Amino acid sequence: MEWFTASEYWLSRLVFQRALAGLYLVAFLTAALQFRPLIGDRGMLPVRRYVDLVPFKAAPSLFHFHYSDRFFALCAWSGCAVSAALLAGVDALLPLWAAMLLWLVPWALYLSIVNVGQTWYSFGWESLLLEVGFLAVLLGNDEVAPPVVVLFLLRWVLFRVEFGAGLIKMRGDACWRNLTCLYYHHETQPMPGPLSWFFHRLPRPLHRAEVAANHVTQLVVPFLLFTPQPVATAAASLMILTQLWLVLSGNFSWLNWLTIALAASALRLPDTSPAVPDTPVWYTAVVLTVSALLLALGYHPVRNMISRRQVMNRSFDPLHLVNTYGAFGSVTRIRHEVVIEGTADGTPRTDSDWREYEFKGKPGDPRRWPRQFAPYHLRLDWLMWFAALSPSYAGSWFGTLVERLLEGDRATLKLLRHSPFPPDAPPRYIRARLFRYRYTTWSELRETGTCWERTYVREYLPPTRLAAERS
């Protein structure tokens, strides 16, 4: 069975599996700490309401059979525990079949969460984690050498992630073609990081060189993944360096880290493989059968990539086994932010004592410097960026967010960095205003120490109070 396995990728598999387990842990921790105000029974988009409208076949999930906040918390924290066990290498201590089942557990649990997560879980890295997590089930443990076909499928996913992102850029926005998108991107990206200001202030010729290098990395280098070593390792290494550059420049949840883990599986690392028994026939049959199915399903993302109407971040099956990826097909030139304020005054006026709610990650107070959160994902902060682009993106949840703030809901307030009102003394009125944000210049930074300057644009939501108080 030498044709079936590649023992020289033993260490690469180990690095990939441990990195994936760590990202699973982050994903489940994010779900456990944020689900109540987002999709819980008193959440902005409750799971119970969703599963009443969407059949199991369209969105397979454990929560179609039973939902309660306590049961969701049990699933999320169980996912954390299993992920931690995999990170510690427990799978290597188990029989092969048991290790495969152990890797199947976090995939099934996270699939159940994503399929009822609605808008809050509509990001491409959710599907990517599930697609890659399913392939991890087939990789085996210390009882077998890594299967060649699964290593190929991991490279195939990496190819689609990078090449698909490159194509959507070239098709989507002229600034990618004329190399000027980075004149704006670091300032207008969804959640800037602590170094984003400095990336934005790099010389424009360097920005153009960055975009050109990105096109090479995403449109040319992915093909080299399927060439003989050491060329494939060089290609994967270049992708890792590019992703680390993106990690430094912003907060993109676990997208960059998961891409790095995928690239690590293609590296030819020093051979440390021990002697292993012959590969079981049943394992070979399972891997080949499932791999053939996945390759057949791959028709859909390939057709999407070559289509002039290419779409980003869409799954082609309810199990998220094959998906299409891509980001920033268009780049916004101006940054807008929704600022939410409350007042305890009985009659809201322009000169009332309006106090601002501060979010953890999204820009708010111009004096507050952005922080690094990725790979942890602040779901509300990300959706607030979309809300600033257009109220239509927030129509399903923004009104409920305002209602919960007016109620002083403790779970919702935990999503924020700071509330100007304690839970037992919420505001009488809340309003939302739209501001234009821009990075300060070098001279402004030296004078004020702030990285943002903001200008009022218009009213986003007029002063609003609870319906019970209006009646």
Image (cartoon, rainbow, N blue to C red):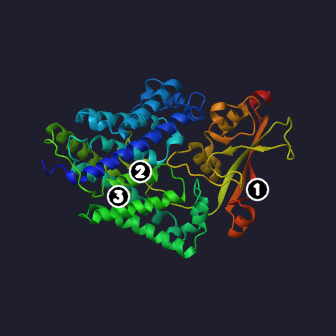
Mark 3 vs mark 2, CA separation in Å? 13 Å
Residues at marks 3 and 2 touching, judged by CB atoms closer than 8 Å: no
Location of residue 255 in the rendering, given as x and y in whole percent from the top left corner: 45, 51
Residue 456: numbered disc: 1
Mark 3 vs mark 1, CA separation in Å? 43 Å
Mark 1 vs mark 2, CA separation in Å? 38 Å
**Circle 3: element type:** helix
Total tally of numbered discs in the picture: 3
The answer to whether residue 467 is visible is: yes
Nearer to the camera, 98 or 122: 98
- Quick check: 99 left or right of 2? right
Location of residue 13 in the rendering, given as x and y in whole percent from the top left corner: 29, 49
Q: Earlier in the sequence, mark 3 or mark 1?
A: 3
Location of residue 275 in the rendering, given as x and y in whole percent from the top left corner: 16, 45
Disc 1 marks which amino acid? Tyr
**Circle 1: element type:** strand
Residue drawn at the location 29% of the way across and 52% of the way down: 12
Question: Residue beneath label 3, please?
Answer: 159
Above or below residue 186? Residue 113 is above
Residue 258: numbered disc: 2
Disc 3 marks which amino acid? Phe
Disc 2 marks which amino acid? Leu
**Circle 2: element type:** helix
Q: Residues within 10 Å of mark 3 (few under 14, many from 20)?
A: many
Quadrant hosting residue 37: top right
Closer to the observer: label 3 or label 2?
2
Residue drawn at the location 49% of the way across and 59% of the way down: 246
Closer to the observer: label 1 or label 2?
2
Quadrant hosting residue 220: bottom left
- Quick check: 453 left or right of 49? right
Location of residue 406 in the rendering, given as x and y in whole percent from the top left corner: 73, 34
